[in-house]
Image: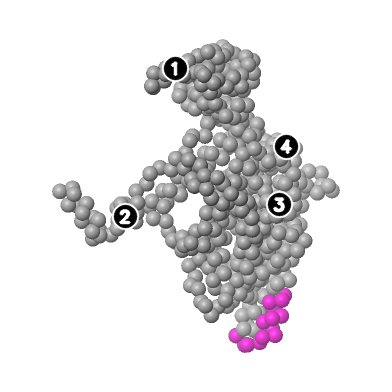
Amino acid sequence: MIRLTSLLRMRAAHTGNAQRASQLRHLHLSDQPLMLLALKQTGPAARPLAVMLGTDPHRPQFLLAPPSGSTTPMLAALADAVTAYIDACQRHSEHLPATSNKPARRRYTDAPQILVPNPQTVQHLKDLGDDLRFRSVDDHSPGSRAVQRLGHWLTYLTDRADLAGSAALIPMTSFLGMHWLSGQSPLEDEDLATLLAWIDPPRHTASGREAALEAEDAATHRPAGPAPDAVFDNDHLAPLFDAYARARRQSLGQEQTRTLLELDRLLATYLQPTWDLMWQAYTLLQALPDAKSTARRWAHERTAFTDECLYLAQDGRPRPARDHAVAAAVRLARMEHAAAAFAAERAADDPFVRAELRTTGEAFGGPVTAIDPEHTLSGPSGRTQWRPRLTVSTPDPVPMEPGQLLACHTYPNARYKICEVTPADGDTLVELEITAGMGTIARPNHAVLPDAGALLVFTSAPASYRMPEFPAREQTPWTHGGPPPDHPDHSNEGEDQQ
């Protein structure tokens, strides 16, 4: 654990109240997100039991699946609700002009955002999407096509949730934990009720710790799903499941209906406290100011959503159950780039993140002790290039090597390269060269030159990203998803080698 994070957790435990871990909100928050709570039955991992969802905190929609038998009617209703929300994001679009590497195109001005209580619900929706997108479509069953489409969108949303900085599907406990640190363990932070009690305790309590203890002991406290509490399952659900199964075996229709109504009331009451907590958390997060880079990431989210809509309209084949080697490598490369870019943008936007990185040697800060605005060097073509240099004195550890590229939040368009690191009188002198954003000798941009004595903080610069070149599937070995050994391509390869 990072030292500053550990210090804030200890301070939260000492004071009894959560500590702010960020001055800004680093994920986009929609004006009308879709809240979704899910419960599953014990047994098959993806068999749904109940869902509460909606965009209005006062009028949630509650859907219940029967304890046994077909879940298609409930899933069809869920599909209608989710796809109606997604379709509403496609009402308006904007024109994007052509660029050097992309033609002119249209992009939706909005994208779906679904908020769930915890990462376990994300995994449940992923399992559900894996199951539903491969279901066959029956023309005699009007809901089957909608259910398959729901599976496609759940797969898309849960895939986006794996990308750092994505705001398409967000677990609320992770969202809150990005901005506040409690005095309990990270594992305990996965309980929405106790985490929110630390952050926003009721007025009648003395501290967040006291409110969290009350939340644990309260009769109204319920786990946020997707698995119901074991005691609740044994004491309340199991008797109703047994009664429903018995009535179904004996063809007692009225008894089945009565049991379902009782189950409906029980589970709606069970989920209501979590529903209220989700909107309380939303209000807290909405009050935080947006980081500068949030708008850029949300624009990228809208681009990804537009591309997925086009794919669904033009092709629409479900993603395979398992990625082959090339697709898995591409996905991993995208995840790694997204994590690095999100970390760099958070550091550029948020002073807390920069302070945290200074404790780990991933950033350093200090006053500018010297500056050489006239420094030049000869470029590869022999032309003279303007490369101003400056020296920073820092008390921070600097494990970085010469050649490392850096960024500075004070001058976001500039880039810096470490030329030399020299220990001196307890501090460290770091000589830097400005490599981007300063213009040319003919047209210099003096705005990126700091004054002597200016306090600057430098972090690792986000590397320019270009997707690595991966071989086509037919060019990979059969052991990694390519053509089988007796495929003509393999025979030709053997002949070429001979």
Give amino acid for label 1: Thr
Residue for badge 3: 31
Residue for badge 2: 474
Q: Residues within 10 Å of mark 4 (few under 14, many from 20)?
A: few
Q: Which residue sits at x=60%, y=26%?
A: 411
Q: Are marks 3 and 2 in contact (CB under 8 Å)?
A: no
Q: Which residue sits at x=39%, y=18%?
A: 382
Kindly identify which numbered label has been placed on residue 384. Answer: 1
Q: Give percent across and percent down for residue 301.
A: 58, 49
Q: Residues within 10 Å of mark 3 (few under 14, many from 20)?
A: few
The answer to which quarter of the image holds residue 255 is bottom right
Q: Give percent across and percent down for residue 26.
A: 64, 42
Residue situated in front as seen by the camera: 54 or 64: 54
Q: Main secondary structure of the magenta part?
A: helix
Q: Give percent across and percent down for residue 294.
A: 63, 42
**Distance CA(mark 3)–CA(mark 4):** 36 Å
Kindly identify which numbered label has been placed on residue 14. Answer: 4
Residue situated in front as seen by the camera: 18 or 178: 178
Question: In this image, 31 relative to 316: left or right?
Answer: right
Give amino acid for label 4: His
Which of pointers 1 and 2 lies earlier in the amino acid sequence?
1
Instruction: Give the secondary structure at mark 2.
Output: helix
